[in-house]
Image (cartoon, grey):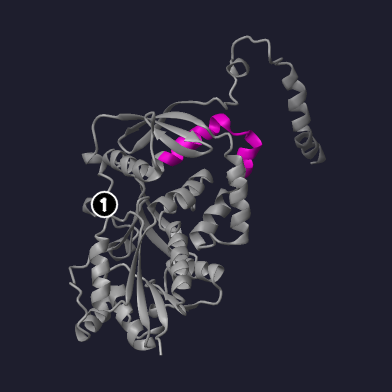
C-alpha cells in the first residue's frame, strides 16, 4: 500500500528539517520537500541535499524569481501599496506565490496535505493558509508549531540530536531574518525592544549612511504601462533590474525602514526592512504617474492604497476583492509610460526630471507668464461655486 504524501515548504534550516522528520513519523507519510527560489541568495543545492538526508522522498527546487517579479512585485508597485505608510510588503508579497507553487506540486503529486514552518504567533501562517484554502479547499493543512509539543529552538535542537538529523547548529543570530530579491526583513530578538537601535552589522544589502558612497549616482528608468523596462536606456529584465538597483541603491544607504506594525493576528510587532531597489522603483513609478495619470484616476487609486496594502499584508492576494482591485490597477496603468531621471545619494532618492509621450502636463497652461489658453477671470466663478457650501454653513451659524 502506497504511503500518503505531504508537501512541505522547506528552507533547509533547523525548524523545517525537524518538521520534515516529524511529519514522516507522525503521519507515516512520504514527505516531499519544496524549496522556493525567490532570490534569497542561499545555497539551495545544499538545502536540497539536506532534505534528502533528513528523509524527503523527493525534492523540488523551484526558480520563481521571474514570476515573483512580474506577477506579484510589479502589480504591487503599480498599486503604490505601502502598509501603514512605511512597509513595502516584501515578505507579505512572497507568501502567496510560495503557497501557489506548493499547491501546484501537491496537486501534481496527489498529496493529501501541505505543511509549513510558520509559528502560531506570526502573520505568515495566515498568509500561507489563506492561499491554500483559496487554491485547493480540500487539501489538509498541517501547521506543526500549533499542534506539537515543541516550543522553542532548544526543543528542536534536542529533537534533532535524538533523531540523528544531520543539522549543523550554528550560533543563533540575535534576531530572525527573511530575504528575497525584493527585500530583507528582520524581527525578534534584540529588535523586540522598540527603543533598541539595530546594529550596523545586521544589514545585508544596505550600507550605513556613514559608509555609503560620497558621490551621487544618476540613473534613468523607463516605464511602459507602469512596468520598468529599461535602465539607463538599456532593455533589462526584472531579475537583473533588481540585482543592479539593490546593489547600487544599497551602496547609497537607501531603503531601510524601522517600524512598529500592526499584525493581522492582533499584536504589534517591530520590523526592520531593507528594500533598496524597491524604494527606487516606487519613487520612480510615482514620478511617471504624476506626468501621465489623470487626476481623478490617481486620487481613486490612492484612496485604495490602504485597502490593497492591507489585503497583501493580511494574506488575501487570491481573494475576489483583490482580483477586482488589480483589474482597476491594470487599467489605470495604460498610459504610465515614460522616463524618469533620479539621483541616489546618502539614503535619498531625488527625482531630477521626467518625460513622456503620454504626458498630460501642458507648459502653456501651467505657466505663470501671460498666455492665450487660460482666462484667469474664469477662476472667479469656479471659486464661488466651490465656496457655496462653506458660505451656507457659516450663515447657518
257 and 146: which is toward the camera: 146
- Relative side of 290 to 51, left or right: right
Q: Is residue 289 magenta?
A: yes
State the residue lying farthest toward the bottom. Answer: 1
The residue drawn where x is 24% and y is 35% is 213
Residue shown at 52% from the left, 26% from the top: 356
Q: Main secondary structure of the magenta part?
A: helix
Question: Residue 52 appears at what percent x and percent y?
Answer: 26, 74
Residue 50 or 78: which is nearer the viewer? 50
Q: Nearer the viewer, residue 358 or 384?
A: 358
Is 96 magenta? The answer is no
Residue 116 coordinates in the image, percent (x, y): 39, 72
Q: Which residue position holds label 1?
A: 203
Image quarter (top left, top right, bottom left or bottom right) of the C terminus: top right
* Span colored in magenta: 281-300
Q: Tag 1, which secondary structure? A: loop
Amino acid at each position: 500500500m502506497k504511503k500518503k504524501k505531504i508537501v512541505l515548504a522547506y528552507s533547509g534550516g533547523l525548524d523545517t528539517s525537524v518538521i520534515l522528520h516529524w511529519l514522516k513519523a507522525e503521519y507515516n507519510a512520504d514527505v516531499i520537500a519544496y524549496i522556493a527560489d525567490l532570490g534569497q541568495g542561499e545555497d539551495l543545492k545544499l538545502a536540497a541535499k539536506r532534505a534528502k538526508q533528513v528523509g524527503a522522498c523527493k525534492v523540488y527546487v523551484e526558480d520563481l524569481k521571474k514570476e515573483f517579479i512580474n506577477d506579484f512585485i510589479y502589480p504591487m508597485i503599480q498599486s503604490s501599496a505601502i502598509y501603514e505608510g512605511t512597509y513595502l510588503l516584501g515578505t507579505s508579497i512572497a507568501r502567496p506565490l510560495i503557497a501557489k507553487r506548493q499547491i501546484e506540486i501537491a496537486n501534481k503529486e496527489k498529496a493529501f496535505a501541505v505543511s509549513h514552518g510558520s509559528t502560531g504567533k506570526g502573520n505568515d501562517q495566515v498568509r500561507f493558509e489563506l492561499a491554500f484554502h483559496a487554491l485547493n479547499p480540500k487539501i489538509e493543512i498541517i501547521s506543526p508549531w500549533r499542534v506539537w509539543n515543541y516550543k522553542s529552538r532548544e526543543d528542536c535542537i534536542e529533537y534533532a540530536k535524538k533523531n540523528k538529523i544531520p543539522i549543523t547548529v550554528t550560533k543563533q543570530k540575535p534576531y530572525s531574518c527573511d530575504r528575497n530579491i525584493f527585500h530583507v526583513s528582520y524581527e525578534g530578538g534584540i529588535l523586540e525592544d522598540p527603543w533598541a537601535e539595530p546594529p550596523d552589522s545586521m544589514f545585508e544589502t544596505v550600507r550605513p549612511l556613514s559608509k555609503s558612497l560620497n558621490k551621487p549616482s544618476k540613473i534613468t528608468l523607463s516605464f511602459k504601462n507602469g512596468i520598468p523596462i529599461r535602465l539607463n536606456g538599456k532593455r533589462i529584465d526584472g531579475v537583473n533590474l533588481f540585482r543592479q538597483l539593490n546593489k547600487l541603491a544599497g551602496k547609497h544607504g537607501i531603503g531601510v525602514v524601522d517600524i512598529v506594525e500592526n499584525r493581522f493576528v492582533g499584536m504589534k510587532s517591530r520590523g526592520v526592512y531593507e528594500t533598496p531597489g524597491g524604494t527606487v522603483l516606487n519613487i520612480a513609478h510615482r514620478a511617471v504617474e504624476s506626468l501621465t495619470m489623470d487626476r481623478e484616476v490617481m486620487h481613486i487609486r490612492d484612496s485604495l492604497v490602504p485597502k490593497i496594502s492591507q489585503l497583501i499584508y493580511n494574506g488575501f492576494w487570491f481573494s475576489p476583492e483583490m482580483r477586482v482591485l488589480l483589474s482597476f490597477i491594470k487599467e489605470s496603468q495604460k498610459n504610465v509610460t515614460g522616463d524618469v531621471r533620479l539621483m541616489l545619494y546618502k539614503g535619498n532618492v531625488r527625482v531630477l526630471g521626467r518625460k513622456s509621450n503620454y504626458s498630460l502636463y501642458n507648459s502653456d497652461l501651467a505657466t505663470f507668464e501671460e498666455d492665450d489658453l487660460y482666462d484667469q477671470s474664469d477662476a472667479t466663478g469656479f471659486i464661488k461655486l466651490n465656496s457655496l457650501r462653506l458660505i451656507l454653513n457659516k450663515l447657518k451659524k
